[in-house]
Amino acid sequence: MKEALWVRLRRKSPRNLARIVWQMAWLRIFSLLYSVWLRFLGAEVGRGCLFRGPLEIRGDPARIRIGSHCVFEPWVCLWTHDYGEGHGRIELHDSVLLGRRVTVNSYDRITLGEGCALGDGCYVQDNDHGTMPDVPILAQPSHGAAITFGPDVWLGARCIVLKGVTIGAHTVAGAGSIVVKSLPENVVAVGVPCRPVKLRGGEELKRAA
């Protein structure tokens, strides 16, 4: 059984306790003020979100929706491409956690369900360039397809998720995986490309012959 927070704090030295209390208070104050700032810019932000540093927002903040009690580690980038109405939308449901240096890059729409957690360095992108011959790469048109995460999805550090992918509820993708095809619910998936290897409860999945 987990000890109560106040019991753990009592074991700290007065100096450490003062430091912890100051850090917690500053985090709450900064997060409250930063939430107000994001709403002023046009983003929708729920209650009780924690920001351990400012976000890097590219594109229109009004195309970003952040649910309640989300947590953002430093250097998170939310990128919405301004190519007209209907392009570039990011929706984070309640209690989403984005680790350090996570990038969410949307040309179409990216939706993260309630309780999703993305480890440090994850990259989620719902678009890519065309590859027509005799056209410079920077002149290629972009193509997008929406990405959807069900609730309680966990991506290990430095996962990459590419366009058109749906990840089912309660699924885990191992660190360093590249997800190019949709994943079902309640599985653990790993690899490049990422494939289910077992159920979340631990039962191994049979591989096709």
Image (cartoon, rainbow, N blue to C red):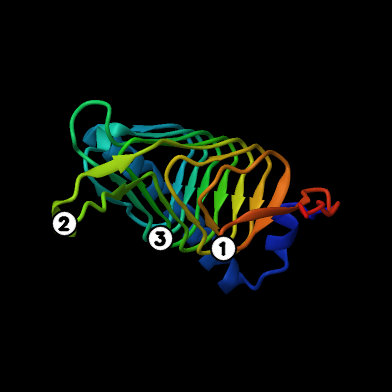
Q: Mark 1 — residue?
A: 192
Q: Mark 3 — residue?
A: 74
Relative to residue 162, is residue 61 drawn left or right?
A: left
- Going from N to C along the chain, the mark reached first, 3 or 2, is 3
Other-residue count near label 1 (Cα within 10 Å), few / some / many at <14 / 14–19 / ≥20: few
Relative to residue 167, is residue 98 drawn left or right?
A: left
Q: Mark 2 — residue?
A: 138
For the residue pair 75 and 183, the one nearer the viewer reads as: 183
x and y percentages locating residue 117 in the rendered image = 57, 49
Quarter the C terminus occupies: bottom right
Other-residue count near label 2 (Cα within 10 Å), few / some / many at <14 / 14–19 / ≥20: few
Tell me what residue is drawn at x 13 percent, y 52 percent. Answer: 139
Q: Which mark is residue 153?
A: none
Q: Secondary structure at mark 2?
A: helix
Q: CA distance from mark 3 to mark 1?
A: 27 Å
x and y percentages locating residue 133 in the rendered image = 20, 56
Above or below — where is 181 with respect to 26? above
Tell me what residue is drawn at x 14 percent, y 55 percent. Answer: 135
Q: Amino acid at mark 3?
A: Pro
Relative to residue 87, is residue 73 drawn left or right?
A: right
